[in-house]
Image (cartoon, grey):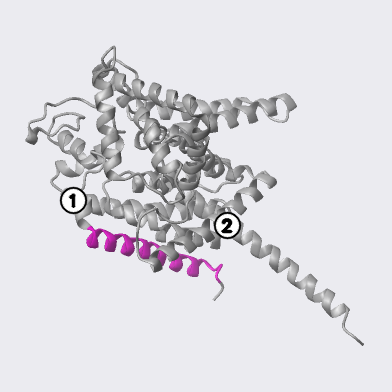
Protein backbone atom coordinates (compact mmCIF):
# COMPACT_ATOMS: atom_id res chain seq x y z
CA UNK A 1 0.00 0.00 0.00
CA UNK A 2 1.27 3.45 -0.89
CA UNK A 3 2.04 5.68 2.09
CA UNK A 4 0.29 8.57 0.37
CA UNK A 5 -3.09 6.85 0.04
CA UNK A 6 -5.84 8.50 2.15
CA UNK A 7 -6.77 5.24 3.87
CA UNK A 8 -3.22 4.63 5.05
CA UNK A 9 -2.77 8.21 6.21
CA UNK A 10 -6.02 8.13 8.19
CA UNK A 11 -5.14 4.84 9.86
CA UNK A 12 -1.66 6.10 10.69
CA UNK A 13 -3.07 9.29 12.21
CA UNK A 14 -5.50 7.35 14.41
CA UNK A 15 -2.67 5.12 15.63
CA UNK A 16 -0.51 8.15 16.41
CA UNK A 17 -3.32 9.82 18.36
CA UNK A 18 -3.89 6.56 20.23
CA UNK A 19 -0.17 6.36 21.00
CA UNK A 20 -0.18 9.94 22.29
CA UNK A 21 -3.17 9.25 24.55
CA UNK A 22 -1.84 5.94 25.89
CA UNK A 23 1.62 7.34 26.68
CA UNK A 24 0.18 10.35 28.49
CA UNK A 25 -2.35 8.29 30.38
CA UNK A 26 0.41 5.93 31.50
CA UNK A 27 2.49 8.85 32.77
CA UNK A 28 -0.49 10.27 34.67
CA UNK A 29 -1.28 6.90 36.27
CA UNK A 30 2.32 6.11 37.19
CA UNK A 31 3.05 9.62 38.53
CA UNK A 32 -0.40 10.61 39.78
CA UNK A 33 0.99 12.01 43.03
CA UNK A 34 2.76 14.77 41.09
CA UNK A 35 -0.57 16.22 39.97
CA UNK A 36 -1.15 17.35 43.56
CA UNK A 37 2.27 19.01 43.91
CA UNK A 38 1.80 22.77 43.77
CA UNK A 39 5.19 23.97 42.54
CA UNK A 40 3.95 27.25 41.08
CA UNK A 41 0.89 27.87 43.28
CA UNK A 42 -1.55 27.20 40.43
CA UNK A 43 -3.51 24.74 42.55
CA UNK A 44 -3.75 27.16 45.47
CA UNK A 45 -5.11 29.87 43.16
CA UNK A 46 -7.52 27.41 41.54
CA UNK A 47 -8.88 26.23 44.89
CA UNK A 48 -9.45 29.81 46.01
CA UNK A 49 -11.22 30.63 42.76
CA UNK A 50 -13.44 27.56 43.11
CA UNK A 51 -14.23 28.53 46.70
CA UNK A 52 -15.11 32.11 45.73
CA UNK A 53 -12.06 33.68 47.39
CA UNK A 54 -10.82 35.38 44.25
CA UNK A 55 -7.49 35.15 42.42
CA UNK A 56 -5.16 34.63 45.36
CA UNK A 57 -2.52 32.08 46.30
CA UNK A 58 -3.12 32.52 50.04
CA UNK A 59 -4.00 29.41 52.04
CA UNK A 60 -6.96 30.15 54.35
CA UNK A 61 -6.70 26.70 55.92
CA UNK A 62 -3.26 27.70 57.23
CA UNK A 63 -4.54 30.97 58.63
CA UNK A 64 -3.15 33.15 55.87
CA UNK A 65 -4.98 36.37 55.07
CA UNK A 66 -6.47 36.49 51.59
CA UNK A 67 -4.42 38.81 49.41
CA UNK A 68 -5.04 39.23 45.67
CA UNK A 69 -2.16 38.35 43.39
CA UNK A 70 -1.03 38.79 39.82
CA UNK A 71 2.17 36.80 40.32
CA UNK A 72 1.02 33.98 38.05
CA UNK A 73 -0.74 34.18 34.64
CA UNK A 74 -4.47 33.49 34.95
CA UNK A 75 -5.48 31.05 32.21
CA UNK A 76 -4.21 27.76 33.65
CA UNK A 77 -5.45 28.29 37.24
CA UNK A 78 -8.85 29.32 35.85
CA UNK A 79 -9.05 26.02 33.95
CA UNK A 80 -8.08 24.14 37.10
CA UNK A 81 -10.64 26.11 39.09
CA UNK A 82 -13.42 24.84 36.83
CA UNK A 83 -12.30 21.27 37.52
CA UNK A 84 -12.06 21.82 41.27
CA UNK A 85 -15.46 23.52 41.27
CA UNK A 86 -17.10 20.33 39.91
CA UNK A 87 -15.05 18.22 42.36
CA UNK A 88 -13.00 16.59 39.57
CA UNK A 89 -9.78 17.01 41.57
CA UNK A 90 -6.45 15.57 40.48
CA UNK A 91 -8.16 12.97 38.28
CA UNK A 92 -9.84 15.71 36.28
CA UNK A 93 -6.57 17.60 35.96
CA UNK A 94 -4.82 14.49 34.67
CA UNK A 95 -7.51 13.80 32.08
CA UNK A 96 -7.40 17.44 30.98
CA UNK A 97 -3.64 17.20 30.48
CA UNK A 98 -4.04 14.01 28.44
CA UNK A 99 -6.70 15.58 26.22
CA UNK A 100 -4.62 18.72 25.66
CA UNK A 101 -1.65 16.56 24.70
CA UNK A 102 -3.66 14.59 22.13
CA UNK A 103 -5.10 17.81 20.68
CA UNK A 104 -1.57 19.19 20.37
CA UNK A 105 -0.65 16.19 18.23
CA UNK A 106 -3.80 16.67 16.16
CA UNK A 107 -3.18 20.35 15.39
CA UNK A 108 0.48 19.71 14.64
CA UNK A 109 -0.67 17.22 12.02
CA UNK A 110 -3.21 19.72 10.66
CA UNK A 111 -0.51 22.37 10.37
CA UNK A 112 1.75 19.93 8.54
CA UNK A 113 -1.02 19.24 6.03
CA UNK A 114 -1.49 22.97 5.51
CA UNK A 115 2.24 23.20 4.82
CA UNK A 116 1.83 20.54 2.11
CA UNK A 117 3.55 17.70 3.96
CA UNK A 118 1.00 14.84 4.00
CA UNK A 119 3.50 12.24 5.18
CA UNK A 120 5.75 14.67 7.03
CA UNK A 121 2.76 15.86 9.05
CA UNK A 122 2.41 12.33 10.45
CA UNK A 123 6.10 12.20 11.37
CA UNK A 124 5.82 15.58 13.11
CA UNK A 125 2.77 14.27 14.98
CA UNK A 126 4.82 11.28 16.16
CA UNK A 127 7.55 13.61 17.42
CA UNK A 128 5.04 15.63 19.45
CA UNK A 129 3.35 12.45 20.69
CA UNK A 130 6.64 11.10 22.05
CA UNK A 131 8.38 14.29 23.18
CA UNK A 132 9.96 13.55 26.60
CA UNK A 133 9.34 17.02 28.07
CA UNK A 134 5.65 17.06 27.12
CA UNK A 135 5.21 13.51 28.39
CA UNK A 136 6.96 14.25 31.69
CA UNK A 137 4.97 17.41 32.41
CA UNK A 138 1.64 15.76 31.64
CA UNK A 139 1.66 14.70 35.29
CA UNK A 140 2.45 18.18 36.64
CA UNK A 141 -0.08 20.92 37.35
CA UNK A 142 1.95 23.40 35.32
CA UNK A 143 1.56 25.26 32.04
CA UNK A 144 3.82 23.23 29.73
CA UNK A 145 1.06 21.05 28.26
CA UNK A 146 -1.46 23.88 27.88
CA UNK A 147 1.07 26.20 26.26
CA UNK A 148 2.10 23.53 23.74
CA UNK A 149 -1.56 23.03 22.82
CA UNK A 150 -2.09 26.77 22.35
CA UNK A 151 1.04 26.92 20.18
CA UNK A 152 -0.22 24.12 17.93
CA UNK A 153 -3.61 25.80 17.55
CA UNK A 154 -2.15 29.27 17.01
CA UNK A 155 0.37 28.07 14.43
CA UNK A 156 -2.33 26.21 12.55
CA UNK A 157 -4.48 29.34 12.35
CA UNK A 158 -1.59 31.59 11.31
CA UNK A 159 -0.36 29.15 8.67
CA UNK A 160 -3.90 28.82 7.29
CA UNK A 161 -3.97 32.55 6.68
CA UNK A 162 -0.58 32.57 4.97
CA UNK A 163 -1.00 29.48 2.83
CA UNK A 164 -2.07 30.23 -0.70
CA UNK A 165 -5.16 28.52 -2.13
CA UNK A 166 -6.27 27.34 1.27
CA UNK A 167 -9.11 24.86 1.18
CA UNK A 168 -10.06 25.40 4.81
CA UNK A 169 -13.76 26.27 5.18
CA UNK A 170 -12.91 28.54 8.12
CA UNK A 171 -11.25 31.00 5.76
CA UNK A 172 -14.46 31.84 3.90
CA UNK A 173 -14.74 34.74 6.34
CA UNK A 174 -11.18 35.94 6.75
CA UNK A 175 -12.06 38.71 9.17
CA UNK A 176 -13.80 36.35 11.60
CA UNK A 177 -10.98 33.81 11.30
CA UNK A 178 -8.34 36.45 11.98
CA UNK A 179 -10.36 37.73 14.97
CA UNK A 180 -10.53 34.17 16.35
CA UNK A 181 -6.79 33.86 15.86
CA UNK A 182 -6.42 36.96 17.99
CA UNK A 183 -8.55 35.38 20.71
CA UNK A 184 -6.29 32.31 20.75
CA UNK A 185 -3.20 34.52 20.82
CA UNK A 186 -4.65 36.47 23.75
CA UNK A 187 -5.29 33.23 25.64
CA UNK A 188 -1.71 32.17 24.94
CA UNK A 189 -0.47 35.44 26.46
CA UNK A 190 -2.61 34.72 29.52
CA UNK A 191 -0.96 31.31 29.74
CA UNK A 192 2.64 32.42 29.23
CA UNK A 193 3.60 36.08 28.83
CA UNK A 194 6.42 35.10 26.44
CA UNK A 195 3.82 34.93 23.67
CA UNK A 196 3.71 38.72 23.92
CA UNK A 197 7.25 38.84 22.50
CA UNK A 198 6.10 36.62 19.63
CA UNK A 199 3.23 39.05 19.03
CA UNK A 200 5.56 42.04 18.93
CA UNK A 201 7.90 40.35 16.47
CA UNK A 202 4.97 39.21 14.35
CA UNK A 203 3.50 42.72 14.17
CA UNK A 204 6.90 44.14 13.25
CA UNK A 205 7.41 41.69 10.39
CA UNK A 206 3.87 42.09 9.03
CA UNK A 207 4.02 45.88 9.14
CA UNK A 208 7.45 45.87 7.51
CA UNK A 209 6.20 43.57 4.75
CA UNK A 210 3.13 45.77 4.19
CA UNK A 211 5.26 48.92 4.01
CA UNK A 212 7.68 47.25 1.57
CA UNK A 213 4.83 46.11 -0.68
CA UNK A 214 3.34 49.57 -0.63
CA UNK A 215 6.71 51.10 -1.51
CA UNK A 216 7.07 48.75 -4.48
CA UNK A 217 3.37 49.23 -5.31
CA UNK A 218 3.04 45.48 -5.80
CA UNK A 219 0.11 45.12 -3.41
CA UNK A 220 -2.17 47.35 -1.38
CA UNK A 221 -1.28 47.59 2.30
CA UNK A 222 -4.95 47.87 3.22
CA UNK A 223 -5.43 44.10 3.48
CA UNK A 224 -2.52 43.73 5.91
CA UNK A 225 -3.81 46.58 8.07
CA UNK A 226 -7.29 45.04 8.19
CA UNK A 227 -5.87 41.68 9.26
CA UNK A 228 -3.78 43.26 12.01
CA UNK A 229 -6.83 45.23 13.18
CA UNK A 230 -8.98 42.10 13.45
CA UNK A 231 -6.11 40.26 15.15
CA UNK A 232 -5.62 43.09 17.66
CA UNK A 233 -9.33 43.17 18.43
CA UNK A 234 -9.33 39.46 19.24
CA UNK A 235 -6.29 39.77 21.47
CA UNK A 236 -7.77 42.75 23.29
CA UNK A 237 -11.05 40.92 23.94
CA UNK A 238 -9.15 37.93 25.36
CA UNK A 239 -6.83 39.85 27.69
CA UNK A 240 -9.24 42.61 28.75
CA UNK A 241 -10.84 40.74 31.70
CA UNK A 242 -7.41 40.21 33.28
CA UNK A 243 -6.36 43.78 32.50
CA UNK A 244 -9.57 45.24 33.95
CA UNK A 245 -9.32 43.07 37.05
CA UNK A 246 -5.79 44.30 37.71
CA UNK A 247 -6.83 47.90 37.15
CA UNK A 248 -9.58 47.49 39.75
CA UNK A 249 -7.57 45.49 42.28
CA UNK A 250 -4.06 46.92 41.91
CA UNK A 251 -4.86 50.26 40.24
CA UNK A 252 -2.30 49.37 37.58
CA UNK A 253 -2.66 48.11 33.97
CA UNK A 254 -0.85 44.79 34.54
CA UNK A 255 -1.13 42.93 31.24
CA UNK A 256 1.08 39.96 32.12
CA UNK A 257 2.20 39.21 35.69
CA UNK A 258 4.23 40.62 38.58
CA UNK A 259 6.60 37.68 38.21
CA UNK A 260 8.99 39.08 35.60
CA UNK A 261 11.29 40.95 37.96
CA UNK A 262 11.91 37.87 40.09
CA UNK A 263 12.58 35.70 37.02
CA UNK A 264 15.07 38.21 35.64
CA UNK A 265 16.80 38.59 39.00
CA UNK A 266 16.88 34.83 39.54
CA UNK A 267 19.17 34.44 36.54
CA UNK A 268 21.18 37.61 37.05
CA UNK A 269 22.63 37.85 40.53
CA UNK A 270 26.11 37.35 42.03
CA UNK A 271 25.23 34.08 43.78
CA UNK A 272 23.97 32.48 40.57
CA UNK A 273 27.02 33.75 38.70
CA UNK A 274 29.35 32.24 41.29
CA UNK A 275 27.58 28.90 41.81
CA UNK A 276 26.53 28.14 38.23
CA UNK A 277 27.85 30.51 35.57
CA UNK A 278 31.51 30.32 36.68
CA UNK A 279 31.36 26.58 37.23
CA UNK A 280 31.79 23.76 34.67
CA UNK A 281 28.81 22.85 32.48
CA UNK A 282 26.19 20.83 34.36
CA UNK A 283 26.43 22.74 37.63
CA UNK A 284 23.08 23.49 39.24
CA UNK A 285 22.08 25.93 41.92
CA UNK A 286 21.84 23.89 45.13
CA UNK A 287 18.60 24.03 47.07
CA UNK A 288 20.31 25.24 50.24
CA UNK A 289 22.05 28.12 48.49
CA UNK A 290 18.89 29.10 46.59
CA UNK A 291 16.88 29.12 49.81
CA UNK A 292 19.49 31.28 51.53
CA UNK A 293 19.51 33.70 48.59
CA UNK A 294 15.70 33.97 48.63
CA UNK A 295 15.73 34.73 52.36
CA UNK A 296 18.39 37.42 51.89
CA UNK A 297 16.23 38.87 49.11
CA UNK A 298 13.28 39.14 51.48
CA UNK A 299 15.47 40.87 54.07
CA UNK A 300 16.63 43.38 51.48
CA UNK A 301 13.02 44.06 50.49
CA UNK A 302 12.01 44.62 54.11
CA UNK A 303 14.78 47.17 54.68
CA UNK A 304 14.37 48.92 51.32
CA UNK A 305 13.72 52.67 51.38
CA UNK A 306 11.01 53.50 50.53
CA UNK A 307 9.45 50.17 51.64
CA UNK A 308 8.31 47.79 48.90
CA UNK A 309 5.10 46.16 50.07
CA UNK A 310 2.85 45.63 47.06
CA UNK A 311 3.50 43.07 44.33
CA UNK A 312 4.07 45.79 41.75
CA UNK A 313 6.59 47.56 43.96
CA UNK A 314 8.42 44.32 44.68
CA UNK A 315 8.45 43.48 40.98
CA UNK A 316 9.89 46.88 40.03
CA UNK A 317 12.50 46.66 42.80
CA UNK A 318 13.65 43.25 41.53
CA UNK A 319 13.87 44.54 37.98
CA UNK A 320 16.04 47.41 39.22
CA UNK A 321 18.24 45.06 41.24
CA UNK A 322 18.69 42.74 38.25
CA UNK A 323 19.62 45.65 35.98
CA UNK A 324 22.14 46.86 38.57
CA UNK A 325 23.69 43.37 38.73
CA UNK A 326 23.95 43.27 34.94
CA UNK A 327 25.59 46.69 34.80
CA UNK A 328 28.02 45.78 37.60
CA UNK A 329 29.24 42.55 35.97
CA UNK A 330 28.63 42.77 32.21
CA UNK A 331 31.05 39.99 31.28
CA UNK A 332 29.35 37.54 33.65
CA UNK A 333 25.99 38.66 32.29
CA UNK A 334 27.12 37.74 28.77
CA UNK A 335 28.34 34.37 30.06
CA UNK A 336 25.01 33.80 31.81
CA UNK A 337 23.15 34.62 28.56
CA UNK A 338 25.21 32.02 26.72
CA UNK A 339 24.54 29.56 29.52
CA UNK A 340 20.79 30.18 29.28
CA UNK A 341 20.93 29.74 25.51
CA UNK A 342 22.65 26.40 25.98
CA UNK A 343 20.21 25.35 28.70
CA UNK A 344 17.20 26.32 26.63
CA UNK A 345 18.39 24.22 23.68
CA UNK A 346 20.01 21.47 25.72
CA UNK A 347 19.72 17.87 24.53
CA UNK A 348 19.22 16.37 27.98
CA UNK A 349 17.91 17.63 31.35
CA UNK A 350 20.40 18.64 34.03
CA UNK A 351 19.04 16.08 36.48
CA UNK A 352 20.44 12.71 37.42
CA UNK A 353 18.78 9.76 35.69
CA UNK A 354 19.67 6.30 34.47
CA UNK A 355 22.43 6.44 31.85
CA UNK A 356 20.36 4.55 29.28
CA UNK A 357 17.43 6.96 29.64
CA UNK A 358 19.73 9.97 29.56
CA UNK A 359 21.50 8.81 26.40
CA UNK A 360 18.15 7.99 24.78
CA UNK A 361 16.81 11.49 25.45
CA UNK A 362 20.08 13.03 24.27
CA UNK A 363 20.04 11.12 20.99
CA UNK A 364 16.34 11.87 20.47
CA UNK A 365 16.75 15.62 20.86
CA UNK A 366 20.03 15.73 18.95
CA UNK A 367 18.38 14.33 15.82
CA UNK A 368 15.26 16.47 16.13
CA UNK A 369 17.03 19.74 16.90
CA UNK A 370 19.63 19.14 14.19
CA UNK A 371 16.83 18.67 11.67
CA UNK A 372 15.01 21.75 12.98
CA UNK A 373 18.14 23.87 12.60
CA UNK A 374 18.59 22.67 9.04
CA UNK A 375 14.93 23.33 8.31
CA UNK A 376 15.16 26.88 9.67
CA UNK A 377 18.24 27.68 7.59
CA UNK A 378 16.69 26.27 4.42
CA UNK A 379 13.42 28.15 4.91
CA UNK A 380 15.17 31.43 5.64
CA UNK A 381 17.22 30.98 2.48
CA UNK A 382 14.16 30.06 0.39
CA UNK A 383 11.99 32.76 2.02
CA UNK A 384 8.90 30.59 2.47
CA UNK A 385 6.28 32.95 3.96
CA UNK A 386 3.92 30.20 5.12
CA UNK A 387 6.62 28.90 7.50
CA UNK A 388 7.24 32.34 8.97
CA UNK A 389 5.13 31.91 12.13
CA UNK A 390 7.15 28.86 13.20
CA UNK A 391 10.48 30.61 12.77
CA UNK A 392 9.38 33.86 14.45
CA UNK A 393 7.89 31.92 17.37
CA UNK A 394 11.17 30.11 18.00
CA UNK A 395 13.22 33.29 17.57
CA UNK A 396 11.08 35.30 20.01
CA UNK A 397 11.13 32.65 22.75
CA UNK A 398 14.88 32.18 22.36
CA UNK A 399 15.58 35.90 22.68
CA UNK A 400 13.38 36.28 25.79
CA UNK A 401 15.06 33.34 27.52
CA UNK A 402 18.51 34.75 26.89
CA UNK A 403 17.75 37.15 29.76
CA UNK A 404 15.27 35.39 32.03
CA UNK A 405 15.71 32.24 34.05
CA UNK A 406 15.40 29.19 31.82
CA UNK A 407 15.84 25.47 31.37
CA UNK A 408 14.69 22.77 28.95
CA UNK A 409 11.04 22.83 30.01
CA UNK A 410 10.76 26.47 28.96
CA UNK A 411 10.86 25.35 25.32
CA UNK A 412 7.82 23.08 25.75
CA UNK A 413 5.60 25.60 23.89
CA UNK A 414 7.92 25.31 20.87
CA UNK A 415 7.64 21.53 20.44
CA UNK A 416 5.02 21.61 17.62
CA UNK A 417 7.11 24.13 15.65
CA UNK A 418 10.33 22.23 16.29
CA UNK A 419 8.75 18.96 15.13
CA UNK A 420 7.50 20.43 11.85
CA UNK A 421 10.79 22.20 11.11
CA UNK A 422 12.76 19.06 11.90
CA UNK A 423 10.69 16.96 9.51
CA UNK A 424 11.14 19.60 6.81
CA UNK A 425 14.89 19.74 7.37
CA UNK A 426 15.41 15.98 7.27
CA UNK A 427 13.04 15.49 4.32
CA UNK A 428 14.95 18.06 2.25
CA UNK A 429 18.21 16.36 3.20
CA UNK A 430 16.78 13.02 2.04
CA UNK A 431 15.66 14.58 -1.24
CA UNK A 432 19.14 16.01 -1.78
CA UNK A 433 20.76 12.62 -1.17
CA UNK A 434 18.25 10.91 -3.47
CA UNK A 435 19.03 13.47 -6.16
CA UNK A 436 22.78 13.00 -5.76
CA UNK A 437 22.75 9.21 -5.80
CA UNK A 438 21.69 8.66 -9.44
CA UNK A 439 24.18 11.28 -10.63
CA UNK A 440 27.02 9.58 -8.78
CA UNK A 441 25.95 6.19 -10.11
CA UNK A 442 25.82 7.46 -13.70
CA UNK A 443 29.24 9.05 -13.39
CA UNK A 444 30.62 5.82 -12.00
CA UNK A 445 29.10 3.78 -14.82
CA UNK A 446 30.47 6.17 -17.45
CA UNK A 447 33.97 5.41 -16.23
CA UNK A 448 33.64 1.62 -16.38
CA UNK A 449 36.39 -0.06 -18.40
CA UNK A 450 35.28 -1.34 -21.79
Look at the picture and state if 84 lies above or below 270: below
Residue at 41% over, 44% down: 410
Mark 2 Cα shell of 10 Å, populated few (<14), some (14-19), many (≥20): many
Name the foreground residue: 284 vs 372: 284
Image-based side of 111 in relation to 386, left or right: left
Q: Where are the magenta residues, as a range?
A: 3-31
- Of helix, strand and loop, which one carries label 2? helix
Q: Quadrant of the N terminus?
A: bottom right
* Image coords of residue 415 (percent x, y): 45, 51
Q: Which mark is residue 110?
A: none
> In the rendered structure, are the residues bearing label 2 and label 1 in contact, judged by CB atoms less than 8 Å apart?
no
> Few, some or many C-alpha atoms within 10 Å of disc 1 (few <14, some 14-19, many ≥20)?
many
Residue 358: percent from left, percent from top = 41, 63
Where residue 249 sits, quadrant-wise, is top left
In the rendered structure, which disc, 2 or 1, sits on the residue that comes first in sequence?
1
- Residue 411 at x, y percent in the picture: 44, 46
Kindly identify the residue that appears in the image at 60 percent across and 56 percent down.
Answer: 425
Residue bearing mark 2: 371
Vertical arrangement, residue 391 with respect to residue 64, above or below: below
Residue 163 makes an appearance in the image: no
Circle 1 sits on which residue?
A: 90
Location of residue 295 in the rendering, given as x and y in whole percent from the top left corner: 24, 32
Tell me the chief SS of the magenta region. helix
Amino acid sequence: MSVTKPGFLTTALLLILLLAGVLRLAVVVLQSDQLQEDRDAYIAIARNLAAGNGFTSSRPEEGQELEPTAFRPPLYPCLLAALYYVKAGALGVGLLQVQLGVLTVWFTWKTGLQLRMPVGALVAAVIVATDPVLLQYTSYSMTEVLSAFLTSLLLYMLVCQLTEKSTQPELTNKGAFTFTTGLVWGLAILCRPTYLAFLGLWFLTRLSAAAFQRFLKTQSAGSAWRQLTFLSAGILIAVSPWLIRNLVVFHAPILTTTHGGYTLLLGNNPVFYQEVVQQPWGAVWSGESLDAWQKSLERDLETAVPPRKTEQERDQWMYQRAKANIAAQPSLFVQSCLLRLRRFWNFSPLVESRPLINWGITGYYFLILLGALGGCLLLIWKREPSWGPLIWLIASFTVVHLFYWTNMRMRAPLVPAIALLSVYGWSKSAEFLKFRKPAETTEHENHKPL
